[in-house]
Image (spheres, grey):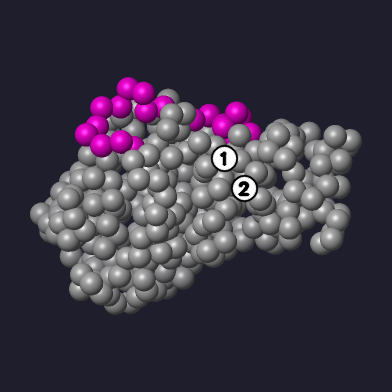
């Protein structure tokens, strides 16, 4: 048993009226002891559920991310030569189970337009046990689970897409997954993962969320860590995917203008409609393959909406409408299909 960890656990687990938040340094120390499993299984489970009840503060999230940065194997963008800066998308690791995920297609669209994209995650995990991004990539012919970090780095340089696969590249974090299953709830690390960057240098980060208080925590955490280029998206199931049937609530921060909120209305561009329901994994893969080929009429509007928004947001297109037009053109002309072929061949 770790006496040092026990003192930190007592601080966060003392109850509604007496528990206290950890300082950034204390959260860093606690996370190091968790990742290195210096704390016992009982201590780890107790910490996770206590923090789940208390909710992590921005200072604690910053400390957790400090520990992730120290122990994780991360990619570098130092020698990448692309016309646009790289982007990291942060989606819930436990996947999607209610709507068809679009992040993989969005990544291919951006990469085909010269915007490198880095994703991260693992296999099917609790609590949702939804379809993970890595499984979609496998079904499309790209198996990131077998890549070493150097192979992932090379793949990113050649294609503009990288995937940091936790079981292979960050096993310490992956080893905590079993505790998620045992406590039956998302721990605070599930929040930290949404705003973590598996890249050594500064990049643009896009983080999905469900509840507005989470976005506020993200904003304060980014400020504490000196991150000045980020986007928060109230997306489908907490992902970075924009919905067709509701107004998109998007927070944008960059060095030039600071933080601002952007309300995106799909009906302004004739893209309103229903979000395609998740029926089965086979249906999801078939729909995604059809959209990439430019012939799935049900999913195409959602793909155009998301691809076009991010093409505009990351400077490929001068306006939202130009982004939507370009995304549609790339799909119909076969550019996205060709890009996927390049990924498979590499």
What percent of the width, then of the height, locates residue 223? Answer: 52, 42
Q: Residue at x 36, y 23 (%)?
A: 78
Residue placed under numbered mark 2 in the picture: 58
Which residue is outermost to the front?
257
Q: Residue at x 46, y 70 (%)?
A: 98
What percent of the width, then of the height, locates residue 307? Answer: 26, 56
Q: Nearer the viewer, residue 17 or 139?
A: 17
Asked if the residue at tag 2 contacts the one at tag 1, i.e. Cβ–Cβ closer than 8 Å, the answer is yes
Picture layout, residue 151 above or below residue 10: above
- The secondary structure that most of the magenta stretch takes on is loop
Residue placed under numbered mark 1 in the picture: 224
Picture layout, residue 180 above or below residue 116: below
> Exactly how many numbered labels are in the figure?
2
Q: Which residues are magenta?
A: 67-86
Residue 26 is left or right of residue 75, and the answer is right
The N terminus - image quarter: top right
């Amino acid at each position: 048993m770790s006496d040092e960890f026990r003192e930190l656990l007592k601080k966060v687990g003392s109850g509604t009226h007496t528990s206290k938040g950890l300082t950034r340094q204390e959260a860093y120390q606690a996370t190091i002891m968790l990742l290195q499993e210096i704390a016992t299984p009982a201590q780890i489970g107790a910490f996770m559920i206590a923090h789940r009840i208390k909710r992590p503060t921005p200072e604690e999230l910053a400390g957790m991310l400090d520990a992730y940065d120290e122990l994780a194997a991360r990619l570098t963008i130092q020698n990448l030569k692309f016309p646009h800066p790289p982007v990291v998308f942060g989606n819930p690791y436990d996947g999607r189970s209610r709507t068809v995920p679009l992040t993989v297609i969005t990544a291919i669209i951006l990469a085909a337009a010269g915007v490198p994209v880095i994703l991260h995650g693992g296999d099917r995990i609790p609590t949702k046990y939804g379809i993970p991004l890595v499984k979609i990539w496998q079904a499309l012919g790209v198996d990131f689970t077998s890549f070493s970090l150097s192979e992932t780095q090379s793949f990113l340089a050649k294609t503009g897409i990288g995937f940091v696969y936790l079981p292979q590249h960050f096993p310490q974090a992956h080893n905590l997954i079993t505790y998620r299953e045992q406590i039956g709830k998302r721990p605070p690390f599930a929040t930290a993962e949404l705003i973590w960057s598996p890249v050594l240098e500064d990049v643009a980060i896009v983080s999905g969320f469900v509840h507005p208080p989470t976005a506020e925590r993200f904003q304060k955490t980014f400020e504490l860590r000196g991150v000045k280029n980020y986007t928060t998206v109230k997306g489908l199931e907490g992902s970075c995917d924009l919905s067709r049937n509701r107004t998109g609530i998007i927070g944008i921060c960059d060095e030039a203008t600071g933080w601002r909120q952007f309300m995106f209305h799909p009906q302004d561009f004739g893209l309103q409609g229903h979000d395609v329901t998740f029926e089965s994994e086979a249906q999801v893969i078939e729909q995604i393959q059809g959209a990439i080929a430019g012939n799935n009429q049900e999913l195409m509007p959602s793909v155009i909406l998301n691809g076009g928004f991010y093409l505009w947001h990351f400077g490929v297109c001068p306006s939202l409408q130009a982004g939507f037009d370009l995304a549609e053109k790339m799909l119909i002309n076969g550019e996205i299909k060709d890009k996927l072929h390049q990924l498979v061949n590499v």
